[in-house]
Amino acid sequence: MALELQILGVAYGLGMFYFLYASWRRHELTKGDFYLWSFAWLGFIFVLIFPNASESLRVFLKISGGQVPFFTIFGFMFLTGVVFYLYQKVRSNSRKIERIVKEVAIKRAK
């Protein structure tokens, strides 16, 4: 059963990497975004292919209970980082839109 899950996970990771690459080629992502997500998806694939590679890091960080708690902790860390990044982008865009709306309203009032 584990081999089938690994194959499914690797196929998912490769598919997501393909979508990432296609988005980058369409200039929908910056180089920084591309590198960050490339690292994430390639790391995901690497750990699926070589599950024991993360074992030494898990032991060093003294995370007991096997691979599941390890990936849960790092998954939450990654997701909270992504959510914070998205929040910053939304707030930045919101301020830009607010400024533009104010400028248009002032021009129309004159």
Image (cartoon, rainbow, N blue to C red):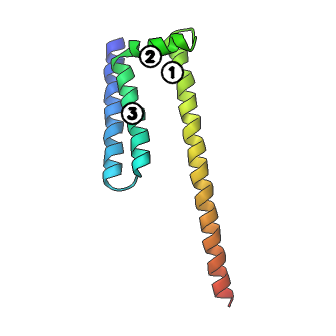
Rendering coords of residue 79 (x, y %): 55, 35
Depth-wise, is mark 2 or mark 3 nearer the camera? 2
Return the disc, 1 or 3, that comes first in the chain's sequence.
3
In the drawing, does residue 61 fall left or right of residue 10?
A: right
- Looking at the image, residue 19 lies above or below residue 93: above
Picture layout, residue 69 above or below residue 42: above
Q: What amino acid type should be assigned to the residue bearing mark 2?
A: Ser
- Residue at which label 1 appears: 71
Q: CA distance from mark 2 to mark 3?
A: 15 Å
Where is residue 68? Give x, y as percent: 51, 16
Amino acid type at image mark 1: Phe
What residue is pinned by disc 3? 41
Judging depth in this view, the residue of 36 and 72 nearest the camera is 36
Helix, strand or loop for disc 2: helix
Mark 3 is on which residue type? Trp
Whether the residues at callouts 1 and 2 have beta carbons within 8 Å, the answer is yes
Residue at x 55% of width, y 8% of height: 65
Which mark is first along the chain, 2 or 1?
2
